[in-house]
Amino acid sequence: MTRIKGLQELFKRYRRPGDIVFAWVFLVLSVFLLSQLGSQAPWNPKGKTFSQPAFWPTVAVITMTGFAAFHLLSSFLSTRLDGRWTEVWAWVRSVEYAGWFMAYVYLVPVLGYLPMTMGFAVLLGLRAGYRSAKVLRTLAALGVVIVIVFKGFLEVKIPEAAVYEYLPTAMRSFFLTYL
C-alpha cells in the first residue's frame, strides 16, 4: 500500500494541470487519423500483410489511439490540479511563433528574401521585448548576414520575389541574383 501511495505522490508531483485538455485533443486527433486510414493508406488485396504500404501507418495510428485513450483515462483518474487553463493558454501562445514563421514563408516570394529576413528579425526582436536601437540595428544586420550565408556560401535556392519584377532590368537581375 505504501508503494502505491509513493507512486501516487510521484505522479502528483510531475503531473501538469493542463494534462486532461491535452489528452482530449490528442484522442480526438488520433480518432480523426484513424478514420482517414482507409482513404489515405489503402490496402492491396493481393499483397502480403507486412509488405503493405498501409501496414505500418495502420499499426502506428491504432497504437497512438490506444495510448491516447489510456492517457485520457489516467487524466480522469488523477487528482485535479489548479491552473489548467493557464497552462492551456501557454500552449496557445506558443503557436503564435508558428504564425510568424508562416507569414515569413508566405511573404518571402512576394517581397524578397533580404527585406523579409531583416524585417522579421527586427519584428521578432520587438516581439521579444527588445526596444534598444542598437539591438534592433544588430538584428537587421543579422538578417543581412543570414542572407549572405544562405544565398552566398550555402547556395540555397530561394524563390525570387514578385516585387522585383517592377524594378528596372539592370537592378532586377542584381536583386534576383544577390538578394
Image (cartoon, rainbow, N blue to C red):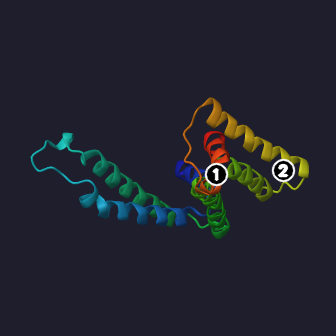
Examine the rendered structure and indicate whether residue 17 appears above or below residue 14: below
Rendered residue at 56%/61% (across/down): 19
Residue at the front extreme, as displayed: 169
State yes or no: discs 1 and 2 in contact (Cβ < 8 Å): no
Q: Amino acid at mark 1?
A: Gly
Q: Position of residue 71 (x, y in %)?
A: 46, 58
In this rendered view, identify the residue nearer to me: 61 or 102: 102
In this rendered view, identify the residue nearer to me: 162 or 124: 162
Q: Amino acid at mark 2?
A: Leu
The mark found on residue 149 in the picture is none
| Figure quadrant of the C terminus | top right
In this rendered view, identify the residue nearer to me: 55 or 148: 148
When asked about the image quadrant of residue 147, the answer is: top right
Q: Secondary structure at mark 1?
A: loop
Q: Nearer the viewer, mark 1 or mark 2?
A: 1
When asked about the image quadrant of residue 40, the answer is: bottom left
Rate crowding at label 1 as few (under 14), some (14 to 19) or many (20 or more) other CA atoms within 10 Å. Answer: many
Left or right of 93 on screen, residue 68: left
Q: Secondary structure at mark 2?
A: helix
Which residue lies under the disc numbered 1? Answer: 112
Q: Position of residue 106 (x, y in %)?
A: 57, 58
Rendered residue at 63%/57% (across/down): 166
Q: CA distance from mark 1 to mark 2?
A: 20 Å
Which residue lies under the disc numbered 2? Answer: 136
Rendered residue at 76%/41% (across/down): 142
Examine the rendered structure and indicate whether residue 147 appears above or below residue 34: above
In this rendered view, identify the residue nearer to me: 5 or 106: 106
Q: Earlier in the sequence, mark 1 or mark 2?
A: 1
Rate crowding at label 2 as few (under 14), some (14 to 19) or many (20 or more) other CA atoms within 10 Å. Answer: many
